[in-house]
Image: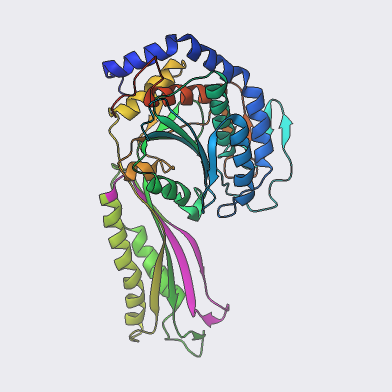
């Protein structure tokens, strides 16, 4: 981790952490942790599978208003957000957000259990914790009369998980790209982890179809499952670089219609990721060629031209992007973490809502939710809130550093 910082940024954090109002606000966040955990448990019981966040969005809108956020709106995607207006009336904003959706289907979360200091419920961490944390940040800003120079937007976004492909965040930042100066997302584990690069991700749905037939009587007819197998075997031999980290996997496979039948159809889904947009694009082109090669090879084996055909559809496209670890946004995030007594642990990659602003050239980081957690994306998920308020303290300091605190610090150029 680089530990050299621009002097003006160091001075901003020195002024913030020595200001009496800011000290009171940081202490407020520690005292408010009990309320935050109560709201976290309340929110997790409002189930919000990806693409079905409406009820949680409506409830979160009310909580945002109660915390002191102004002009709270729910957009057509069910993103919900509002503002704390700055003294500078610049029309520019710093965004703080967490995502509303979870990976679990309706009916999964029926109760919240507490045992040995831990809170058990599917979705209690990812990303319900962020939603509650950001409410506390709003409360401390309004209760302690901290007036930023630029506006602050606080949002709950939809469709981050799975095939949502971060489309809620994409919609929000695309519509406010001229306004947002920087974005902070709260996601991922612990108080020290931070993500500042955008791992790109592409998913394809690939289907092979053919005439099929009886396994004995129609032997010699090209098979959809054999074509799929040829394609998967070739995909598994793709060579990818270690740096930038690049990965792929055929994740789901299905096919055939009878145990004694030559398959009429077969389907697989492939996930491809890279920290480099260029490398990801190259791998995508390789994969597209291989999809067709699987059908061609199976047809050639049996001398039956075009018997098996392939169709494919891109079902997810999350852009890749990068920021230098020495860029001022990342420096500020590190300084905020250090100011809370935590040594930051930057991650070179990461696929979070920060991908969307980074892809647009908007400085962005994702900070961990705080506390300890286990089993995210499983029904065994639990959360230990010990020391969790540090997450909110980091968010507050970073927001004030980037937005500027009236009569204390100026907003820096990023």
Q: In terms of depth relative to the viewer, which is nearer, 356 or 224?
A: 356
- Looking at the image, is 9 positioned above or below residue 225? above
The residue segment tinted magenta is: 250-277
Left or right: 227 in relation to 156:
left
- Above or below, 6 relative to 180: above
Can residue 313 be seen from the camera position used here?
Answer: yes
Q: Position of residue 156 (x, y in %)?
A: 53, 41
Where 240 falls versus 132 (above or below)? below
Which residue does the image show at 54% across and 28% down from the upper left? 138
Locate residue 51: give its quadrant.
bottom right
Residue 261 on the magenta span: yes
Q: Is residue 30 left or right of residue 46?
A: left
Which residue is more in the foreground, 294 or 5?
A: 5
Q: Quadrant of the C terminus?
A: top left
Q: Residue at x 30, y 52 (%)?
A: 280
Q: What percent of the width, then of the height, locates residue 55?
A: 64, 49
Q: Quadrant of the N terminus?
A: top left
Q: Nearer the viewer, residue 244 or 161?
A: 161
Q: Is residue 150 magenta?
A: no
The residue at the point 51 percent across, 38 percent down is 82
Residue at the location (54% across, 50% down)?
Answer: 78
Residue 372 horizontal/vertical position (percent): 57, 28
**Main SS of the magenta segment?**
strand
Q: Position of residue 102 (x, y in %)?
A: 58, 46
Q: How is the image coloured?
A: rainbow
């Amino acid at each position: 981790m680089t530990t050299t910082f621009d002097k003006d940024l160091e001075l901003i954090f020195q002024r913030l952490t020595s200001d009496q109002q800011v000290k009171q606000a940081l202490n407020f966040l520690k005292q408010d942790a009990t309320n935050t955990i109560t709201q976290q448990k309340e929110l997790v019981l409002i189930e919000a599978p990806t693409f079905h966040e409406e009820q949680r969005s409506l409830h979160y809108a009310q909580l945002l208003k109660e915390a002191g956020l102004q002009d709270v709106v729910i957009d057509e995607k069910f993103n919900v957000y509002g503002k704390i207006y700055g003294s500078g009336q610049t029309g520019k904003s710093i965004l703080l957000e967490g995502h509303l959706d979870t990976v679990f289907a309706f009916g999964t979360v029926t109760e919240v259990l507490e045992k040995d200091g831990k809170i058990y419920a599917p979705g209690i961490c990812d990303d319900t914790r962020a939603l509650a944390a950001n409410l506390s940040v709003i409360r401390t800003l309004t209760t302690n009369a901290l007036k930023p120079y630029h506006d602050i937007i606080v949002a709950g976004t939809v469709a981050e998980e799975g095939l949502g492909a971060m489309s809620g965040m994409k919609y929000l930042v695309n519509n406010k790209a001229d306004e947002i100066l920087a974005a902070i997302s709260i996601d991922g584990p612990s108080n020290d982890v931070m993500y500042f690069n955008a791992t790109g991700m592409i998913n394809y749905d690939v289907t092979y179809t053919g005439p099929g037939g009886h396994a004995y009587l129609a032997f010699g007819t090209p098979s959809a499952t054999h074509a799929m197998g040829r394609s998967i075997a070739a995909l598994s031999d793709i060579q990818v670089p270690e740096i930038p980290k690049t990965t792929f996997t055929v994740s789901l496979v299905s096919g055939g219609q009878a145990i004694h039948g030559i398959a009429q159809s077969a389907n697989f889904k492939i996930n491809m990721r890279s920290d480099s947009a260029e490398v990801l694009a190259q791998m995508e082109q390789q994969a597209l060629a291989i999809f067709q090669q699987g059908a061609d090879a199976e047809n050639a084996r049996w001398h039956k031209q075009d018997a098996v055909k392939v169709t494919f559809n891109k079902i997810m496209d999350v852009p890749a992007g990068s920021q230098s670890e020495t860029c001022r946004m990342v420096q500020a995030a590190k300084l905020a973490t250090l100011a809370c007594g935590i040594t930051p642990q930057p991650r070179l990659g990461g696929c979070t809502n920060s991908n969307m602003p980074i892809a647009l050239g908007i400085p962005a980081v994702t900070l961990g939710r705080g506390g300890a957690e286990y089993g995210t994306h499983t029904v065994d998920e639990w959360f230990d809130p010990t020391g969790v308020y540090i997450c909110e303290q980091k968010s507050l300091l970073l927001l004030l550093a980037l937005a500027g605190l009236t009569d204390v610090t100026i907003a820096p150029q990023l």
